[in-house]
Amino acid sequence: MEADARAQQSHLPGAPAPHPTFARERPRPGARVLLRACRPRQWAKNALVLAAPCSAGVIFRPLVAAQVAGAFAVLCLVSSATYLLNDVRDREQDREHPRKRERPIASGEISPAFALLFASALALIGVALGALITPGLGVLACVYLALTACYSLWLRHVFVADMLVIAAGFVLRALAGGIATDIYLSRWFVIVTGSCAVYLVAAKRYAELGARTGAPSSRATLRRYSRGGLRLVLLAAASVAAAGYIGWAFTRPSHLVWYIGSIAPFLLWLARYATLIGAGAGEAPEDLILRDRALLLLSSAWGVLFLGGVYVGG
């Protein structure tokens, strides 16, 4: 009778209806849901592990290719662990977002407790796999996890530091390819990679700021940025990236024509991206880069010229 009374009370006018997602405990999520929670579309960023081996012209060596594939897997594991942690922390805000509310944790398909357990397992496997490939890669995986965890729990609310941490994540991805394959990373490589990372992160903040003009922002630090200030950061980062790449290209000991030729698509790519940001795009850089035909064309042209200098020469 008490159960019937409670059931009747739950349907009384004015009584709060149970949340459709959390009205009953959901079964353990399936593989497809877990994969979606890992944000596989974001794994494209981990292709930066190819940068150092491709630049050194050794990517087609079987051992190097295997090491690079392993480094890519390590970054996918540890980055997915970070995404899960971030989604657990942001689940309440994500439920109010028109797109993010479909994420498995926000929608209730995965419980926060299970998500954290799964994230821990991914992190442990990623670090172990990295250490198995080379101890340095295991250390880098630990640094990445520590940095991104600090971002999710604290640094995301610190002005400027939030941008620098995300940019550092890109740099660590690029460094992972060199560490996994024991390739020397020149100062030009670090300068261009770091400045391009800052450029992309500042562009993302610029787009987010423009999209939230006149509306309250869920990102606390975003209120402290200004469009003018971010434009200066974009200009500075693009200038450093351009100067670094041009300096690198003109100091190649051989195949200079290929490398100098690759400067034009590199600069045009930066300019095209800036144009798209000015038009209001860029909140999701991975979508913008993969969907804009001009960016894809410029990326392909740069890749042909760059790799031509490394592997073809002439």
Image: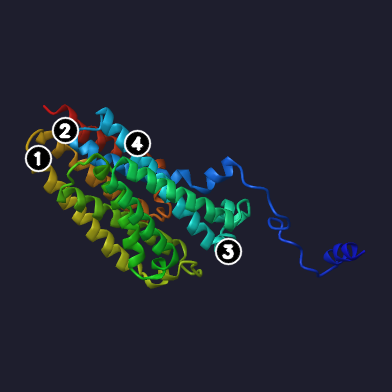
Instruction: Identify the residue under disc 4.
Output: 69
* Among the two numbered marks 4 and 2 on one chain, the one whose residue lies closer to the N terminus: 4
Tell me whether the residue at label 2 lies in contact with that at label 1, contact meaning CB atoms closer than 8 angstroms.
yes
Instruction: Identify the residue under disc 3.
Output: 92
Q: Could you say which is closer to the camera, residue 44 or residue 83?
A: 83
What secondary structure is found at the residue carrying circle 2?
A: helix
**Disc 3: CA contacts within 10 A as few (<14), some (14-19) or many (>=20):** some
Q: Is residue 9 above or below residue 128?
A: below
Instruction: Identify the residue under disc 1.
Output: 252
**Disc 2: CA contacts within 10 A as few (<14), some (14-19) or many (>=20):** many
Q: Could you say which is closer to the camera, residue 199 or residue 158?
A: 158
What is the spatial separation of the Cα atoms under label 4 and label 3, in whole angstroms? 36 Å
* Among the two numbered marks 2 and 1 on one chain, the one whose residue lies closer to the N terminus: 1
* Among the two numbered marks 2 and 3 on one chain, the one whose residue lies closer to the N terminus: 3
Tell me whether the residue at label 1 lies in contact with that at label 3, contact meaning CB atoms closer than 8 angstroms.
no
Q: Is residue 297 visible?
A: no
What is the spatial separation of the Cα atoms under label 1 and label 3, in whole angstroms? 52 Å
Q: Quadrant of the N terminus?
A: bottom right
Q: Is residue 5 visible?
A: yes
Mark 4 or 3: in front is: 4
* Among the two numbered marks 4 and 3 on one chain, the one whose residue lies closer to the N terminus: 4
**111 left or right, relative to 196:** right
Find residue 309 and name its label: 2
Residue 96, horizontal then vertical, whole percent: 59, 62
**Mark 3 residue type:** Glu
- The residue shown at (85%, 65%) is 6
Mark 4 or 2: in front is: 4
**17 left or right, relative to 39:** right
What is the spatial separation of the Cα atoms under label 2 and label 3, in whole angstroms? 50 Å
